[in-house]
Image (cartoon, rainbow, N blue to C red):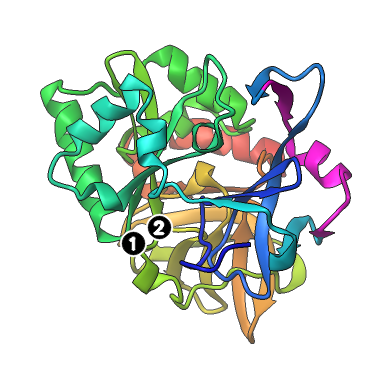
Amino acid sequence: MRAGKPIRLRDFLRVGDWFFSVIGYRNDPEVKCFLRYVPDESGDRILDGRRYRKLTHDEAIGMGKYVKNGIFYVPHRDIDEVYKPEERLGFAERAAEIRKIVDFFEGIPESKMGVTGSRLIGLEGEDSDVDFVVYGKWWFEAREKLKKGIETGRVQEPDSDTWDFIYRKRKISMPYEVFLAHERRKYHRAFIGSTYFDLLYVRDYGEIDRDVPEDMGVKAGKWVVEAELTDDSLIFDYPGYYPVAHDRIRAVLCFTHTFVGQAFKGERILAAGDIEVINGDYYLVVGTKREVQDEFIVSLDLLEKEGLMDEFEVWYRGQA
């Protein structure tokens, strides 16, 4: 493997003919990642004349190799190629729709943008959306541009069919209207013309060592936490970091993109997940699997504002 910049979140790796997405920032001595694509004669993705398919969470875990506690840890010596979104934006720009997104974010250095997911490695399908990365402080500027763009009509928020597709794809069990109320104020999904894209946050290189836990702690059972969010500067990070005013829990850690950006400073959250003890502190961990079922984060203040509290409580009582 080449020497160079550190491997970080949303990079991709190739190990032989397997493709992995990187799912963390602390990647020594092994890279924390997840297996996404493998060769398959009946697969619907084609690269260099060979067919591949995208794996579900359970299919990937079933492959066995490199798996520890439900995550893949690949030694650096086994990596054949690293794909970095910021280095291959020009490669992805062969698609005209990517250029439209770059142009929309005029003023943000192109070195702070990139495309990840299937388009990064050349395995996009006909219906693949655009996973558009912006790094560090520039992401927040991009989000503001996206918000203003939606408000002025330069870009469009997802239509009802797209919201429904995202909801079903993520296999979210909470009511659709509760999901939608949270998503619509995040301003990290949009259409430019007919092109749909996600706006994804990744730390800049100088921020990689941020003091946010990534690795699994000692599990201490399932729990539900209700508390006020005391800071929202890292809610779109990975893991999403929700520090709370609570006598036991230091923070909620969110390991699924489904529940990043769910609440803002001063709002009361309700979160369900696994309690883990990490370096002596207690955390509630949400997103132990890609497809979340019985774990969630919601803003109670938002539910009250939108008149969705009764609908949520009916659903929540049914989960008990």
User: In the figure, 303 relative to 167: above or below?
Assistant: below
Rendering quarter of residue 42: top right
| Quarter of the figure with residue 146 | top left
Query: Residue drawn 86% across and 53% down?
Result: 65
Left or right, 141 with respect to 35, comes to left
Q: How crowded is mark 1: few (under 14 residues within 10 Å), some or many (20 or more)?
A: some
Numbered tag placed on residue 232 in the rendering: 1
Q: Are marks 2 and 1 in contact (CB under 8 Å)?
A: yes
Q: Residue, x 65% and y 64% (percent of image)?
A: 31
In the image, is residue 52 part of the stretch drawn in magenta?
yes
Q: Where is residue 224 in the image (x, y as percent from the top left)?
A: 62, 58
> Taking 278 as reference, is 236 left or right?
left
Q: Which residue is drawn at 38% across and 64% down?
A: 229
Residue 275 appears in view = no
* Front-most of residues 82 and 235: 82
- Residue 298 appears in the rendering: yes
Circle 1 SS class: loop
Q: Which mark is residue 235?
A: 2
Alpha carbon distance from label 2 to label 1 = 5 Å
What amino acid is found at the position of numbered circle 2 in the picture?
Ile
Question: Which residues fall within the magenta stretch?
Answer: 49-67
Q: Residues within 10 Å of mark 2 (few under 14, many from 20)?
A: many
Query: In the image, what residue type sits under mark 1?
Result: Asp
Q: Where is residue 87 in the image (x, y as percent from the top left)?
A: 40, 49
Q: Say which of 118 and 275 sits in front.
A: 118
Magenta stretch containing residue 95, yes or no?
A: no
